[in-house]
Image (spheres, grey):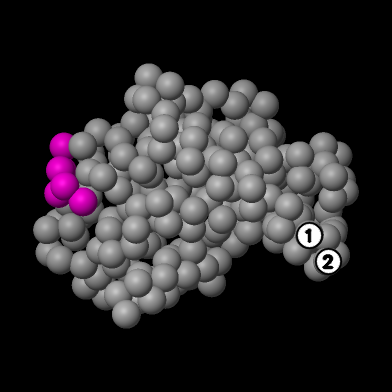
Amino acid sequence: MKEYRALLSLLQLASPSLPIGAYTYSQGLESAIEQGLVRDEASAREWILEAIGIVADFELSILWRLLKAFSARDEIEVAGWTERFIASRDTAEFRAETIQMGYSLAKLVADLKIGDSSLRAILGSQPEIPLPTAFACAAEALAVAHDDALLGMLFSMVENQVLVCVKSVPLGQLSGQRLLLSLHDAIETASRRSRELADDELSSWSPGLSLLSMQHEVQYSRIYRS
């Protein structure tokens, strides 16, 4: 019974319907579509594969460490990895994105009193709360297995990227479902890799994506906030 409850909690956390605003962001993808870098199903798949690798090498690896830190109720570790993640956001849009969604999810955790008071106290003690920190706290509070939490967050990101492509390239619903199915192995591999990286192997180096994000900030016409 507990396993089913944890699965339901994971599905709720990973759902794009969770009201934290994920659907309003494209994470640089709208700029890539505007410039013709993503124009069909094949180029969309290539883009998302690159995004999965970037997330695995940094964001997902930090989420793994945050999950362990919340499990141990280690406020110093939570604060350290939270600060490091925020510092890695190198454009105004990317920084605003993670802080806005982190704040929204943290508010849900607090308002719904998810988990015990010690977890909520650690989360609330952070000066700023990015999404990985709030997600790690919520997953731990809901007794979601750490491996599953990694898969859930990564799939949520991938699904959101596919939805952006379906709406803005545009691609058909069939293409969107085919894309998601074709990326399952990549998601599993990235999740495993994120757990194996040592601290000094973590990297958020993605200059092309950073440039696209900066260009999106001044893009004349846009639907998404990043």
Q: Amino acid at mark 1?
A: Arg
Quadrant where the image shows the N terminus: bottom left
Rounded to the nearest whole Å, what is the CA distance between mark 2 and mark 1? Answer: 6 Å
State the SS at label 2: helix
Magenta span contains residue 75: yes
**Residue 103 left/right relative to 53:** left
Q: Position of residue 181 (x, y in %)?
A: 71, 58
Residue 121 shown left or right of residue 51 in the figure: left
Which three-letter amino acid code belongs to the residue tagged 2? Leu
Look at 14% across and 49% down and name the residue there: 73
Residue 178: quarter of image = bottom right
Could you tell me residue 141's position as x and y percent?
25, 63
Left or right, residue 128 beside residue 178: left
Residue stretch in magenta:
71-76
The residue that label 2 is drawn on is: 174
Kind of element beneath mark 1? helix
Q: Is residue 7 above or below residue 153?
A: below
195 w.r.t. 70: above or below: above
- The residue lying toward the viewer, choosing from 142 and 4, is 4
Residue 64 visible: yes
Tell me what residue is drawn at x 83 percent, y 60 percent: 175
Label 2 Cα crowd, 10 Å radius (few <14 / some 14-19 / many 20+): few
Please name the residue shown 52% across and 68% down the image.
15
Q: Residue at x 67, y 36 (%)?
A: 50
The reply to whether discs 2 and 1 touch (Cβ–Cβ < 8 Å) is yes
The residue carrying mark 1 is: 178
Q: Give the residue furthest to the top.
A: 200
Percent coordinates x, y for residue 21 in the rendering: 51, 62
